[in-house]
Amino acid sequence: MTIDRRDFLSVAALAAGAGALAACSGPDPDQTLARVMQGAGDWDDLRALFALDPEWIDMSAMLITSHPKPVADAVARYRDALDRNPVVFLRDNNDKLQEASRAAAGRYFGVSGDEVALTDSTTQGVSLVYRGLKLRPGQDVLTTTKDYYVTHEALRIAADRSGAQVRKIPLYETLDGISADALADSVVREIRPNTRAVALTWVHSSTGLKMPIGLIGERLARLNEGRSPDERVLFCVDGVHGFANQDATLASLGADFVMSGGHKWLFGPRGTGVIVGRADAWPALDPLIPSFLDSDGYGRWKRDEPPVPTTAAMVTPGGFKPFEHLWALSEAFALHQAIGKAKIQARTAELAGQLKEGLAGMGHVKLRTPLSPELSAGIVSFDVEGANPWDVVDHLQSKRILASVAPYRTPHVRLTPSVRNTPAEIDKALGVIREIRAAA
């Protein structure tokens, strides 16, 4: 595991807070944090940075995170500073600390921090992008019937206001035997001359399917070669369930915009998120909420000047907010960079693979998530024969194993192991699911 020299300041801030790790397990919290940040720690060291209740098996990384102690300590430091002198500390530090979070997110995605907008969640990011698209009557946006409520609703509102059309394609009939090529073909063949944007989800929160976003991005790039800048197909991705458990950059995904929350797989501060966009794509959006990061926004307003082409800073919503969380986002990125994106993806695949293979071997369980790591990430969805999904989740929670139900028309049980979990925890969860059959 290595860490980029540009993350040095964030790492130093984490190390400075190591003395406050009294709540963590292990004989020496300072050394535990130092090992992780130097790339020499193991998964037990990482786990020790969380104050999770050891009586529970938390396989709900897709919902909301426990803050690792470095992030929690940063939030506490900033909160205390604000409590001592909120006006002065905000005045002297807000701009540089928000820019540090944007820069950290940019390094993670392989872009400049100037191409990052800060949000409070995936939902807000998706809404800012889709409702901000400069759509015209007669244009359409392509999505799928498998995408989530937030995508569909944000697109519906955008279409109602612009006169554009939203087309939802079925994508697939069954995931049995599905391939990356088939999924990419299902999307790209539906592109029409009037299609202005494609709105997809990287990892589906219903079935755990990981879409071949990079492959789709490559095919869209070839298609866009014959289009003018105002007519090119914009590729927009709800990336929340691939973000921070897959080793990818904006370029490798081939997307124009990726929207994600920071309080799931990144283990970042709750109430944070990002939109990462291509430099030449931001002018395709209108800002929806006045920004305080737009350095000349007030100047243009006072001079009664027209708006300039949209930037990521202009899309970042203004207003007063939980600044201590926003500022601590850079520490979450530093922690992930220190561990290593490729290592995190491999560990996630290992744990999810163990869970999927165990479930696939049970005659009373129908696995809904593809076994292949090419088409799956950390979400593992399944059904238990003859059992209501909510009853299965209740049974797992009675055994102190956190699971959830996918909030779709067809609900499935979901377990979402992350790098905080262990193979032993996977085995215990599998054992409880076997008990459901025995009980029946």
Image (cartoon, rainbow, N blue to C red):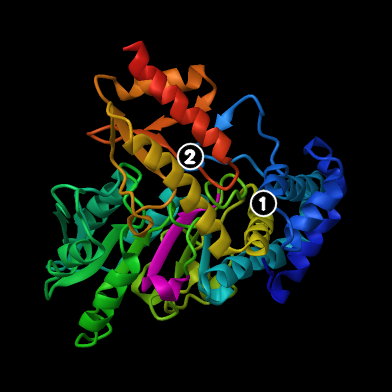
The image shows residue 327 at horizontal and vertical percentages of 68, 56
The image shows residue 311 at horizontal and vertical percentages of 47, 74
Q: Please report contact status of discs 2 and 1: CB closer than 8 Å, yes or no.
A: no
User: Where, by quadrant of the figure, is residue 424 drawn?
Assistant: top right
The image shows residue 80 at horizontal and vertical percentages of 81, 45
Task: Measure how far apart labels 2 and 1 are at the Cα level.
Answer: 22 Å
Which image quadrant: the N terminus? bottom right
Mark identifier at residue 63? 2
Q: Is residue 26 left or right of residue 322?
A: right
Check residue 260 for magenta coloring.
yes
The residue depicted at 26 percent of the width and 56 percent of the height is: 158
Looking at this view, is 268 or 282 the one in front? 268
Looking at this view, is 268 or 18 the one in front? 18
Residue that label 1 marks? 323
Q: Amino acid at mark 2?
A: Leu
Range of magenta residues: 249-262
- Can the viewer see residue 387? yes
Query: Quick one: label 2, few (<14), some, or many (20+) residues within 10 Å?
Result: few
- Can the viewer see residue 317? no
Depth-wise, is mark 2 or mark 1 nearer the camera? 2
Looking at this view, is 390 or 368 the one in front? 368
Sequence-wise, which precedes: disc 2 or disc 1? Answer: 2
**Element carrying mark 1:** helix
